Image (cartoon, helix red, strand yellow):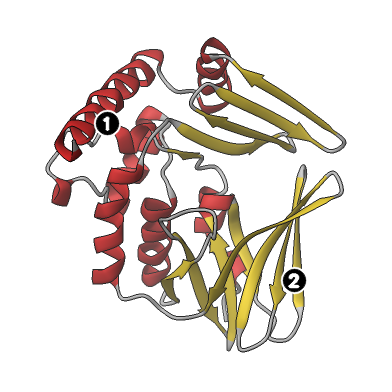
Amino acid sequence: MKTLEDIPFFRILQQIPYENVSKILRLKMQPEERPRDSRTLLSDFRNLHFGGTCFSLVNLLIRSLEIEGIRAYPVKAEIHRRSFPHFFGIVEHENKRYLVDPGYLINQPVEIIPGGNSLLRSGAIDFTIKALENETYQLQTQTNGTQTTRYTFRINPLDLTTFMHYWIRSFDYINAIVASRFVDEKFIYINDDYVQIRSKGNVEKYKQREKAHACLKLYFDLDETMICTAEELLKDYLNKNSEARG
């Protein structure tokens, strides 16, 4: 029986960054056409260095493991400080369940232990899946001694029609360029003009658009023209939505 570690897909997934420039550029399409299928995502990754967000990457996970004969499905998580839920993937293999969450850069399977905790060390950030009561779990992170609860979830498989509904809706919740990835055990996070570069025992923070653009080019190899196009497209989209609501 093939183990999850033997599947080449997970080595590919760990190379694909989280970024929404590729998502913003699809705002000019009709809502039903905006989600990228797995083939398009992989082609964009090879040719344009794009990655994806939780929806497109979880969809890639499901489709890729389906080819291997392994069941995977999306699950909804509640992030209490946000109005829109978060989505990640559950993989079932040899009577065990594993969490894979590209949105939080957990791009390898982490076993979910009923009644116990599991730990993933990823350089600058450690992840813990903590079992609570009533088959409920929390994802927690620990950075430089600070522990934070990221979300709470139950393992309730989400049908793909509902997942697609949320995916289409998610385009209306974009308000800035966001990108994150691990590079040489450093955690790189960009949100609009805010940049955080975190390593063990150290964190650098900047709030400067030029620095954000430079890091998008340096750490994500994204084209400057595409970054600027995405910014203008998002600005126009937000203005139109604001006028429509007003």
Q: Nearer the viewer, residue 56 or 67?
A: 56
Separation of disc 2 and disc 1 at Cα? 40 Å
Q: Where is mark 2, residue-wise?
A: 118
Which quadrant does the C terminus fall into?
top left
Which quadrant does the N terminus fall into?
bottom right
Q: Residue at x 66, y 19 (%)?
A: 206
Neighbours of disc 1 within 10 Å: few (<14), some (14-19), many (20+): some
Q: Residue at x 63, y 75 (%)?
A: 137
Percent of width and height locating residue 240:
18, 30
Instruction: Give the SS element for disc 1.
Output: helix
Q: Residue at x 58, y 25 (%)?
A: 194
Q: In this view, does 29 lie above or below 73?
A: above
Residue 238 - label: 1
Residue 139 - label: none
Percent of width and height locating residue 202:
83, 31
Q: Which amino acid does label 1 sit on?
A: Leu
Q: In this view, does 232 lie above or below 237?
A: above
**Residue placed farthest to the top in the image?**
210
Neighbours of disc 2 within 10 Å: few (<14), some (14-19), many (20+): some
**Residue placed farthest to the left in the image?**
30
Percent of width and height locating residue 38:
32, 53
Q: What residue type is labelled 2?
A: Ser
Percent of width and height locating residue 24:
31, 34
Instruction: Report the number of numbered marks.
Output: 2
Instruction: Give the SS element for disc 2.
Output: strand
